[in-house]
Image (cartoon, rainbow, N blue to C red):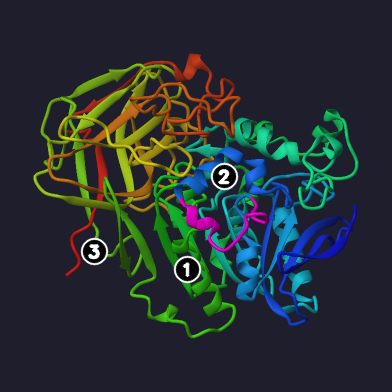
Amino acid sequence: MKHFCEMRDGMKIEWDAPIVMKDGTTLRGDIYRPNDDAAYPVIMTYGPYGKGLLFSEGYPKRWEMLIDAYPEVLDGVSGNHLNWETVDPERWVPWGYTCIRVDSRGAGNSEGFLDLLSPQEAQDIYECIEWAAAQPWCDGKVAMCGISYYASNQWAVAALQPPHLAACIIWEGAMDYYREYSRSGGIMHNLGHNWARPQVYNLQNGVGDYGYKNRLTGENLSGDITLTPEQLAKNRNDFVAYNLEHEMFDAEMQARLPNVSKMTVPLLSSANWGGAPLHPRGNFEGFIKAGSKHKYLEVHGELHWGHLYTKYGLGIQRQFLDHFVKGYDNGWNERPGVVQLQVRHVDKFVERFEDAWPIPRTIWQKWYLTPDSGLTCNEPLCPAVTMTYDPKGDGLTFLSAPFENECEFTGPMALKLFISSSSTDADLFVVVRLFTPDMEEVVFQGANDPKTPIAMGWLRASHRELDTENTLPYRPYHTHTNKQPLTPGDVYELDIEIHPSGIVVPAGYRIGLSVRGKDYIWGGYKHKADPVYPLRTPLETGVSIFQHDDPVDRPIEIFGADVNLHFGNEHKPYLLLPLIPPKR
């Protein structure tokens, strides 16, 4: 492995610097520094996507989408150092930061066994932070800032409290491996098929000559040794097989859930309204549970990786880091609230600050499902009735009357159902939707799919047991430790978590709720392959790469059986929505 330094684009760049872990494993990092001998704070990222793989080269279609949507991303920079989901050193180095990108253990040019989002990775990041802080070009302060994978692993390392970790910007980053990276309400999604295999394994250490080369140096991005497919497979924890094996939240899965209450560094948690099921939940949960004295929540919409690089996003990130890492008195403390929302309308976003999350003035409204397919705030009185749906079809949809006035719903949501099944289990997929006066569904550009509904939730009925310590009226929290099969025909009460979201409903529009036995599919869907994940993932379904259709996890003989929804004076299902009155 060639380790060398050079001057390029006004920066001192050190390629493939060795960082030796306590167990003797050598990781490699690329270091981008200002062109002087002063000591600066560090912004570090650690992940499996190849530290020298340019965004434009590894993800050309996504790059085109990014630049088309936000041409400002290239204002004043070349883009030649902008990598997938990490900060652009060409922008941050002139602002007085050193940027370090580390290939995670077993990925890129770093040795070792590849185990995504494992406790070992958190320990590695801890050691990388402390290594960087001890270098003469570092002033002793190390921050982390990145999106998705480069955000998710920050929760885990921050909980370990590295002495020199100074701040975290967790931009659209999951927090709970089991509930977000592996299973939605206990139902396994296909992130392993659609992400780990095509996007991570092709950059595993040992791909060698068969992999990418660093366009700026000509060196291999995945090691100088070229291993066989069989050797590569033995040197990683198979993401799909692992998640299939661990249906329940067992000891191994629990070890992957960080105790973020131990997090003490300043935190900026940034969520995307349209990121279900992976990213928005963790940003909200982590913000609420983090032990940090200084913690802030920002929520936006649109493309997953867009605002990490826009003037809007960069302005927030730089002000936050300059204040908490460099100590600048730059107005951050004068912000009008710790929660910054881009409140979503059907045609725009409107910025508003709040004092807390959930919003303190929230009115928690129960919208009752009725057997005539209605959705009403009036508590119904009716005899016992059932509605049946085939899980292989489109399920049942319940609609409100047209809204007389504009209303805002922003925050966590929850659904209570009473169901029976003709088999020993059932998978519930619930979708909160918006319809125009002409009954056209309104969908939004989400993080990963351009046709996302307002919000979604999931629950495997046998996973219905609630964690009473963590459950809140507006956010059911399931243990996933005690599988409780159904007795066919018996009625069961289910509380389903719906990931936080927000929408301002115009007058004349309707809210809808769909209860299904399979993934949501946008009504105007026509097959269009995703250029990044072409093997299995179509765009414009509404769920992107997060399909829940693994035949091993969801055998048709169990999850294809009819499901009944029960109504009556003893069974009053309802959707809990967070109505937000205007500020006074």
**Camera-side mark, 3 or 1:** 1
Residue carrying label 1: 315
Question: In front: 461, or 491?
Answer: 461
Which image quarter is the C terminus in? bottom left
Q: Earlier in the sequence, mark 2 or mark 3?
A: 2
Identified by mark 3, the residue type is Arg
Within 10 Å of disc 2 (Cα), the crowding (few <14, some 14-19, many 20+) is some
Q: Is residue 387 left or right of residue 299?
A: left
Q: Residue 342: x and y, percent? A: 34, 58
Q: Which residues are magenta?
A: 70-83
Q: Are marks 1 and 2 in contact (CB under 8 Å)?
A: no
Q: Earlier in the sequence, mark 3 or mark 1?
A: 1
Where residue 338 appears, as percent x and y from the top left, is 39, 70
Residue shown at the point (54%, 32%) measured from the top left:
188
Residue 266 in sight in this render? no
Which residue position is annotated with label 3? 361
Image quadrant assignment for residue 512: top left
Magenta stretch encompasses residue 75 = yes
Decide which of 363, 442 is in the foreground and name it. 442
In the image as oriented, which residue stretches furthest toward the top? 557
Q: Which residue is mark 2?
A: 63
Residue at point 79%, 44% (across, down): 213
Q: Is residue 389 magenta?
A: no
User: Residue 517 falls in which quadrant of the image?
Assistant: top left
For the point 41% across and 45% down, the residue is 274
